[in-house]
Amino acid sequence: MSKVIAEQLEQESPNKIKEIFKSSRKSLDRFVSLGAVIVLFIFFSITAKNFFTMRSVLTLALQTSTITLMGIGVTFTIITGGIDLAIGSVIALSGTIAVMASIAGVPIWLSMLVGLVVGVICGFINGLMVTKLKLPPFIATLGMMMVARGVALTVTNANAWPAAEGFGVLGNGTIFGTGPQFPGIPYPVIIMIVVALIFGFILKKTRIGRYTYAVGSNEEAARLSGIKVAQVKVINYIFSGLLSGLVGVILASRMVTSQPNSAVGYELNAIAAAVIGGTSLMGGVGTIGGTVIGSFIIGVLTVGLTMQGANYFMQQIVIGLVVIGAVAVDQLRGRK
């Protein structure tokens, strides 16, 4: 009897060691990413004038909120082994349709809901193209990127349309403001926090979250274990479309106009935030917390370099190098 127990312990101990090692490595990765945010913040607080002020911090949070929302959506698709290149175009189309609905007399809240529905539809179509037509995610979402942008430009004749009165409250309003010293927390920042908590819970604690990791880790094994792989992928692309639509509504509200030419290249920032935050492009690995940290790394770099006087091109060089480094580290992890 004792021999049997000993043999079981010998078989189980390596697995337990692997689980402990994997868990500790994830914690260490997140700690390193968070440490990078803190180091960057301290660096720019010293080198950039007026960086460490309440107004600058709120501006940083506001600018980062859209990157975070997009990054959360694309994190789900990347974990399944896919990608979403249509984010920027879906943002432009969703915001444009929401503004046009408000101009047509639709109540503001309902017109914004229409914008979200547009994003969901685009995500649903992306999911169907990937699962039913068996198109590579890169090609499917690239096609959607061109179609969505073309529709946005067509319905507006490539012009900016002013939104109805009251449409700008969501993007420009604040809460808990006490005056010039503390103008208040912008609504988009509150939305970012709520969305991060909700989707973090979905990914970590719900069945669809577990299935998402399973599909990304080994799609065939997931299918053989009874998981409806196509359904999981469609849901994840819907998540990405929904959050793209939300960003489109927020940006349209901030500008109080429809901007069919807006959000060009935003999908690159979203993917960069996810990758910097530890989401593996090979699938099966990623967290919402990591993506939030990754988006703040991009946000701190962008705002800090701007305050230091660096032009847009220099910012792109720095962020690009950071992304290359993050992907290189991910590849090295995969080999190990």
Image: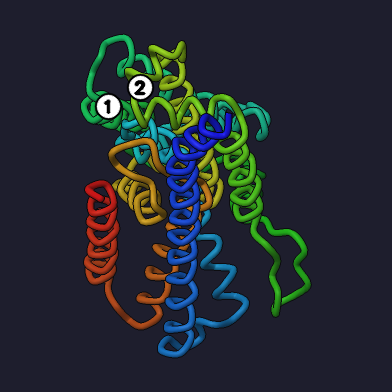
Amino acid, disc 2: Asn
Q: Is 305 placed left or right of 197 in the picture?
A: left
User: Residue 236, image x and y in percent?
Assistant: 45, 27
Q: Is residue 320 above or below residue 259?
A: below
**Alpha carbon separation for disc pair 1 and 2:** 8 Å
The answer to whether any part of residue 262 appears in the image is no
**Which residue in the structure is indicated by mark 1?**
137
Using the image as rendered, state which of residue 236 and residue 4 is in the foreground: 4
Could you tell me which quadrant the N terminus lies in? top right
x 28%, y 38%: residue: 282
Instruction: Name the residue located 57 percent from the left edge and 38 percent from the top edge.
Output: 204
Taking 108 as reference, is 57 above or below it?
below
Tell me residue 100's x, y (percent): 51, 31
Q: Is residue 199 above or below residue 124?
A: below
Q: Is residue 27 visible?
A: yes
Residue to which mark 2 is pinned:
126
Determine the residue positioned at 54% across, 75% down.
56
| Crowding at mark 2 (Cα within 10 Å: few <14, some 14-19, many 20+) | many
Residue 215 point in image, percent of width and height: 39, 25
Residue 225 disc label: none
Where does residue 319 sit, x and y in percent of width and height?
29, 64
Cβ–Cβ under 8 Å for marks 1 and 2: yes
Q: Which residue is drawn at the image coordinates 59% and 68% (left, top)?
A: 58
Tag 1 secondary structure: helix
Amino acid type, callout 1: Pro
* Label 1 CA crowd tier, 10 Å (few <14, some 14–19, many 20+): many
